[in-house]
Image (cartoon, rainbow, N blue to C red):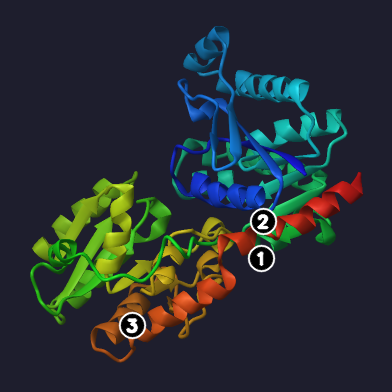
Amino acid sequence: MKILHIMDHSLPRTDGYTIRAKYMLEAQAAAGHEVTVLTSPSQGHGAVDVTINRVRYFRTHYTQFESAAVAFGAKHLVFGRAIVRGITGLMAQQQFDLIHAHTPFTIARIALAQARKRYLPFVYEKRNLWEESAKARGKISGKWPFYQIARAMDRRVSVSADAVCTITQALRANTIALGAAKDRVFVVGNGVDIEAFTPRTANEEIRVRCAGNIKNAFVIGFIGSFFSFEGLPLLVEAFAELSSKYPHARLVLVGDGEDRQKVEQLVTKLALGDRAWVVGSVPHNSVLEYYAAMDVLVYGRYPSMLTNMISPLKPLEPMAMARCVVGSNVGGIAELINDGETGLLFEAGSRHALVATLEKLLCGKIDTVELGQNARAHVVANRQWRNMSAAYEAAYTRAKNRL
């Protein structure tokens, strides 16, 4: 098939949105599809067309007038115009069999209208809830009336699409509750590159830095974005409660984001000193070394509609590296971990529950090595990107048959 993907942004930018897309798109290309991507003006003013691993990326840009409108706060008036112009230009050069639009709905609603205009099958991929993310992070766009408007627009696209792909079973159920037919909603979950993320011996220098020069240190870590819903203050507070009883424990937080200053202030307030290290951002090629240097990775997301329905990428990476992973039991994480078998789950939002879970690891009641090995076997069997990408085929077939 000749598939046109419409996305907010893509490679060479790197975040969860683009990394998931990279593996899915490349798996489609490897399966024989002709894969083309059109990105919105959010890609950046200097973005250029490029081909990466058999996937062609085309860019849209604002005109001078549109750029001026954006500068005056009228982005909503011109954003769609730029994308329509990009779609029209591509359609004039080549034919496509299907349009596949990715979240957010601001992208998808434009792509839906263009697909209908050209009588092409349309697939909507929901891997985030834009309005719920804004609400969870305290953004103005998550408040009334913007929140209600966003929900209404997302519902319209979800119900109108020929097929919908969701990132979790919970999001599938939510999409059906909005009014989408059950036989048109498919789950295409997150995966991991099992060849890039493999078990390895920790880099000695990084391990020593994480361990604080303690030979038998137990390093509790987090690698990811410092968003308010990730539960990092909960992790810091739980660690503070444990650190006096377990002096060999160390906390290492890798990443950056809007909550970083709050986390650093809490580390200082709790007088954790050199027992906790907020590393900040690290080069992409160093992430593997930090995973290898940690004994357990903690993803303690707070409970919310967003975290119960959206699955993070990050826990799968250390799992593929045979590291022990602890996660809160929100729906998006519970779909990734079999509690007690491939990792450990604790009651979301409960410091007491997190302390109790980590204490079992610190005192050796639970074997972190065994859990890590089980996790690796699980993702190899169930969470490889090429296997996740294959789930698109059923959605495409359903979309084509609906026309």
Nearest-to-viewer mark from 3 and 1: 3
The residue positioned 78% from the left and 58% from the top of the image is: 394
Disc 3 crowd rating (10 Å Cα; few below 14, some 14-19, many 20+) is many
Sequence-wise, which precedes: disc 3 or disc 2? Answer: 2
Residue denoted by label 2: 166
Q: Please, what is the three-letter code of the amino acid marked with disc 1?
A: Gln
Whether 397 is drawn above or below 247: the answer is above
Quarter of the rendering containing residue 393: bottom right
- Spot occupied by residue 89 in the image (x, y as percentages of width and height): 71, 20
- Work out how far the residue at label 3 is from the one at label 1, CA to CA, in angstroms: 28 Å
**CB contact under 8 Å: marks 3 and 1:** no
- Work out how far the residue at label 1 is from the one at label 2, CA to CA, in angstroms: 7 Å
Mark identifier at residue 368: 3
- Residue sticking out furthest to the top: 65
Front-lying residue, 124 or 391: 391
- Spot occupied by residue 203 in the image (x, y as percentages of width and height): 21, 64
The residue positioned 51% from the left and 24% from the top of the image is: 48
